[in-house]
Amino acid sequence: MKKALACLATTLLLASPALSWAANRACVIEGSITFSGKTTQVKDCMEFAAGVPDDQIKGSCGGLAQMSAQLGGKPGKVSYLPQCPRPASGACKGLMGQPVDAYYYNLTADALQDKRKACETSSPQIKAGTWTNGQ
């Protein structure tokens, strides 16, 4: 009996990282971006639909975190969560027609308006998302 319990406990401990990762469908990316000599603090969150594979989530989040490094800055910090923190300054549901919602934090009124415009703009290649108040 003790051996069976020890085996079960070991199995649960080994499986727990995989189980906890499976619940993480969102990533918060924090850092700063310098563009044209102006540095802006960034805190965004991407929340992926249930059907998006874990490796795609990690790749997307990691790629976004590297954007500032590609502009000569430091990579952003990525934290994985079950969902994006609420409330946010605003959110784009179905960002670019994809199974992902983007949440934006601590934005000025002008920056928030720019994010909304980008979210709601369609092109022949990119489907518009739906803007919400971030609740």
Image: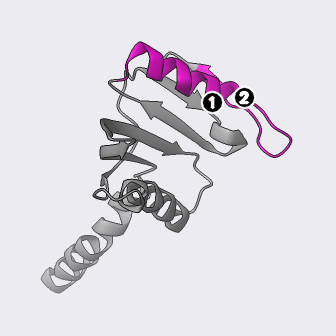
What's the distance in space between the residues labelled 1 and 2, CA to CA?
5 Å
Q: Quadrant of the N terminus?
A: bottom left
The answer to which of 2 and 56 lies nearer the viewer is 56
List the residue tagged with mark 2.
121
Tag count in the figure? 2
Magenta range: 107-131
Q: Disc 2 on helix, strand or loop?
A: loop
The answer to which of 133 and 115 lies nearer the viewer is 115
Disc 1 + disc 2, Cβ < 8 Å: yes
Q: Residue at x 27, y 58 (%)?
A: 74
Where residue 134 appears, as percent x and y from the top left, is: 46, 21
Q: Which mark is residue 29?
A: none
Q: Quadrant of the C terminus?
A: top left
Q: Is residue 18 left or right of residue 112?
A: left
List the residue tagged with mark 1.
118
The answer to which of 94 and 41 lies nearer the viewer is 41
The answer to which of 3 and 120 lies nearer the viewer is 120
Q: Disc 1 on helix, strand or loop?
A: helix
> Looking at the rendering, which quadrant does residue 111 occupy?
top left
Q: Is residue 127 left or right of residue 6?
A: right
Density class for disc 1 (Cα within 10 Å; few <14, some 14-19, many ≥20) is some
Q: Residue at x 37, y 21 (%)?
A: 87
Considering every residue shown, the one lying at the far right of the view is 124
Q: Is residue 64 left or right of residue 121?
A: left
Residue 133 visible in image:
yes
Residue 134 visible in image:
no
